[in-house]
Image (spheres, rainbow, N blue to C red):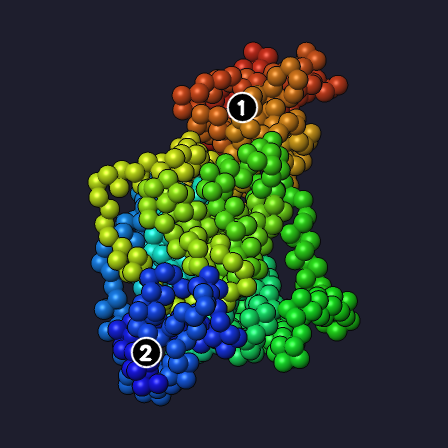
Amino acid sequence: MTDVRAATNALLEDRPAIEPALRELLELDERGPWTFHETSLDSGTFGEVVSAGIVEKTDGAYRLADPDAVQAALRGERRNETGAAARRTTLRLDQIRDRIDRDALVLLFGALLVVALVRFLSAPSVFRGGDIVLLGNDPYYYRYWVEQTTASAGLFEFGALTDLPSGVTKGEPLLVTTLWVVSSLLGGSTDAVGLVVALYPVVAAVLTGALLYGVATSVSDDRRVGLATVLMLALIPVNAYRTGLGFADHHAFDYFWLALTALALVNLLGEDEHDERSWFFAGVLGVGVAGQLLAWDNGALLLVPLAFVVTLAAALSVSRERSPLREGVPVVVGLVLASALVWGAHTALGWHSTVVASVPMLLLVGSIGVFVLAEGAQRAGLSARTLLGAELVAGLALLVGLPSALPELTQGLDRGLNTLFESRNIVETTSLVSGEMGTLVGPLLLLGFIFALGLPYIGWATLQAGRRRDAQWLALAVYAWWFFALAVVQLRFAGEFSVFLAVFAGLGFVHLASVVDLAEPVALFEDGSGGAGESGGPQSQRGRGDHSERDVTLAMPSRREAMSYLGFTALVGSLSFVQIPVKFSQLTVDGAAYRTAAWMRQYADEKGWSYPENYVLSSWGINRMYNYHVNGEAQSYAFARNNYDRLLRADDAAAQYERLRDRVGFVVVDGSVAGGKMAAQFSNYGSESQDVGALSHYRLVHVEGAIRVFTLVPGATLVGDAESETVTASVDVDVGETTFTYENTVDVASDGTFSVTVPYTGEYEIGGKTYAVEERAVSDGAQLRPGGQ
């Protein structure tokens, strides 16, 4: 016993990270003789154990030379806290410093730099003319509320958060709060807010990439897979534009919390020995879950896969003959923390409804129930399949009894499902595989060839979870399939799917590179390394410090290797190189629209207009952009959505003027407007044509390409006598470089009088008589007679 224990102690002193491997061999040895293929050890690690005399081969099988000695060495290490701190992988700074691989750090920095640079493609469209022009429409909503919060509260005056409208507190309160704090730290000016809001998606993307590097290296034990994961994330089109500079929606924030939760899960699942590292990641899990829920009002959808992971991981524990309850303790601790954080924010700040704030607690109670049920099944000797059947029955019973037990929660779930499946005329609510793009082309245009690369490896991970009983790959596969299913329902979830697709595409990238001899083989796919080996082996312990030599020494590539990698990357990312610029161009505000907004702002300032005198009525899809840059208001586009098309399709222009005169300052019409009588009148600059009459209360004030801007005016009313049946008021109008003749024909009354209202200044000739119309007459709605009488 002394020799084997001494050899074990020496091996642990030299390689502390080998402890999980020794524990795995102890567990195997309790069942009798075993083979190398039943372990998850790589050949190098196994060779060290054999050469140390800890393992002996007898009759073609292996046994520990002295299991008691190995167990004693491991117990002794755990009793000696001082020695343990020096030998085991911990989170202490001195050990982290010793384990830093500078080449790996440089390569990781380079990969993250690629992530950032791709997302800066929109920079010329964002920074224009001294303005920060965000991408799309919704980002202005967050910019508006961050500005409002910054203006009303000083740094860390969190009491102001209770005064936010329900649209924020019940929507994305954590995002607005985070941007407010950062903006306040930078001075709190309007420019600071604009810069923070524009840059935040890029920062979130880089942080997400760093977290995914940790996820990928944890599950693969291969830093090359981690680096490839970051590169794949950089090149997925839907992720690139949703985290691009200026696209300050909530999605980039959601991706960060998802990646943080995934990192915690892959470092917690399957562990029945807990140390400070376990409790650290339990805390990370709690923060990640709370962040997901507080970042978005539909954050509960992001937590559904966690419920599936807990359920299936408990069954895996039973199949490995381990204690589900013991393995699940850190997960439960994390959910306790998440429940406390979310409920605390709900009660103290009014964030989210009671239903949403209760989700972590429901997940906590459900997880405890699953682990207790699994523990009972394990002690009773029931199979994992029996346990899954029992869990399914319990889940169905819960769904049946939920409406009567928790009616408010059921109503909230119904509203969420209706939102998920309702059909709206918004692009992101359509399916990933719908429309003209089709089932195959649609995913490729949004996810690139990376989709085709990563999808088979999601399938591999699903098999890995079942055959090798690997809870780490199980978690990632469940998350990937869940968000892929959601993306099939609504396109907006393709971004969440891309977070997990990047991990599997990174694995596929390195594996295929090794197949064509561009890289060393991936240990996951070597015999006996926990990849495609025989089923029935114990779960791999990779990701918990058991790094092979290949992982520890990641060298800078030679010029030839670098060129080979670049060529392979160019092949995989070829479609992305086309689609990413295309997607950015579809989101950026074109030059004509921006110049129009800048012109309206200057015009309103010259007129001394204040809100709502300077409100811009436009298509709702760009309404927030126009109003933010003209009047600073971007809270809602509801008024535009309810009234713009109604205006264009109206038959009675005068009635529309009376309805809108006190609410609208500008009407913006472009070449893409829908049909309708007033739309035709606007397209003819408000002058009459053969098909429609003239507009009397809408004056063209600016033309920018196909965009036309009208203001609402009372108009000057010209009155007089005429012997003809009709009279026509006409005047030549110059608007910038656009010149046209405004004509307005009206019928003469039976008593020989007429009255015609015109929106333009100038001299009008009617029946040989001259009407001099000045600006004051148009703006005051004056009545004029010939010669100014």
Q: Dividing the picture into quarters, in which one does residue 42 lie?
A: bottom left
Residue 58 pos. (x, y %): 43, 70
**Residue 308 visible here:** yes
**Amino acid type, mark 1:** Tyr
Crowding at dot 2, Cα within 10 Å, few <14 / some 14-19 / many 20+, comes out as: many
Specify the amino acid type for callout 2: Thr
Quarter of the image with the C terminus is top right
Using the image as rendered, state which of residue 570 and residue 32 is in the foreground.
32
Residue carrying label 2: 8
Instruction: Name the residue located 36 percent from the left edge and 60 percent from the top edge.
Output: 43
Q: Which residue is mark 1?
A: 685
For label 2, the SS is helix
Task: Please report whichever mark, 1 or 2, sits nearer to the chain's N-terminal start.
Answer: 2
Q: Is residue 39 visible?
A: no
- Viewed as shown, does residue 658 lie left or right of 522? right
**Secondary-structure class at tag 1:** loop
- Residue 778 position within the rendered picture, expressed as x and y whole percent measured from the top left: 52, 31
Q: Is residue 245 left or right of residue 271?
A: left
Q: Residue at 60% across / 39% down in the picture?
A: 433
